[in-house]
Amino acid sequence: MSKPMNPILDQADGLRRLNAPKPVRVIAVTSGKGGVGKTNVSVNLAVAMAGNGKQVMLLDGDLGLANIDVMLGLQPSYNLAHVLEGKCRLEDTLMMGPNGVMIVPASSGKRHMAELSQAEHAGLVRAFSELTRPVDVLIIDTAAGIADSVITFSQASQEVIVVVTGDPTSLTDAYALIKVLNRDHGVERVQVLANMVRDASEAQSVYESLRRVAERFLDITLSFIGGIPHDEWLKRAVRRQRAVVEAYPNCPASEAFRQLARKADSWGMPAGARGNLEFFVERLVHAPVSPLPIALLNNGPLLAGAVLS
């Protein structure tokens, strides 16, 4: 026979749930190589999602070659290097971007930031665990390639967006990154975004090129989340150090970023996701980082058609 419910305790439990912080959606935006527009995607996705009423935080995860602040014409007083040196708290680094996006800047030109020790990684985790700002979405603009920080941030995120273009080297390097994430670090799902494409047909073709090889050789689910067109208005926004969705909201690139934001809004939260940034912090703690030999790049097919032994 079940025990009768205590209305006072039941009400208290309901209030706790009502007041509990909402789980945070964590999205890593990455790429196999530089020069494919990854940071532009991160910035404009963040601004578009904030325009939909989300509390968005954008972390510059390219720890040694940061450029989000440059892209938006911002001049940070503090960055992540200062946090790790104990000169400020993470909250002190925050800058406000378009649509109220909270931006966490990293440092540029400091090589040691790209090669953090375990103790420094732990310091970064502590900094995030102490952050009290309400956040709905955390977007991480990672470095390109397969550096430790890229793998760590990707593992700690619920969704990984790989930005790729139709350039054969971009496709090859994107496959290499996806292979490392899948085979060596257990990532089972990747969202593929085709950037700088002429039209929807080219975007689909870029995705299919990657999907065919990944499905043949890897145990991973690739999902196509669309394409961003090659748009002169976007180039103009970059020169003006503005997000295109803010500077030129009616251009084709801006509409594509808004579609991407709506898609990202529709992704369900994983089971057991915790409130605030706890989920992200816990996954950072449990994401083992190990050196990745260059030989990994030569252990699998290239999309150009060659197979290296």
Image (cartoon, rainbow, N blue to C red):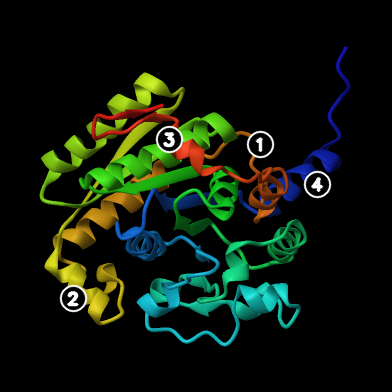
Q: Give above or below for 13 relative to 48.
A: above
Mark 1: amino acid: Gly
Mark 2: amino acid: Arg
Residue labelled with disc 1: 272
Which comes sooner in the sequence, label 3 or label 1? Answer: 1
How crowded pointer 3 is (Cα within 10 Å; few <14, some 14-19, many 20+) is rated as: few
Q: Residue at x 29, y 47 (%)?
A: 170
Q: Give above or below for 271 relative to 291.
A: above
Q: Give above or below for 206 relative to 60.
A: above
* Label 4–label 1 contact, CB within 8 A: no
Relative side of 26 to 41, left or right: right
Residue labelled with disc 2: 236
The residue mark sitting in front, 2 or 4, is: 2
Element at badge 1? loop
Tell me the tag on residue 204. none
* Label 4–label 3 contact, CB within 8 A: no
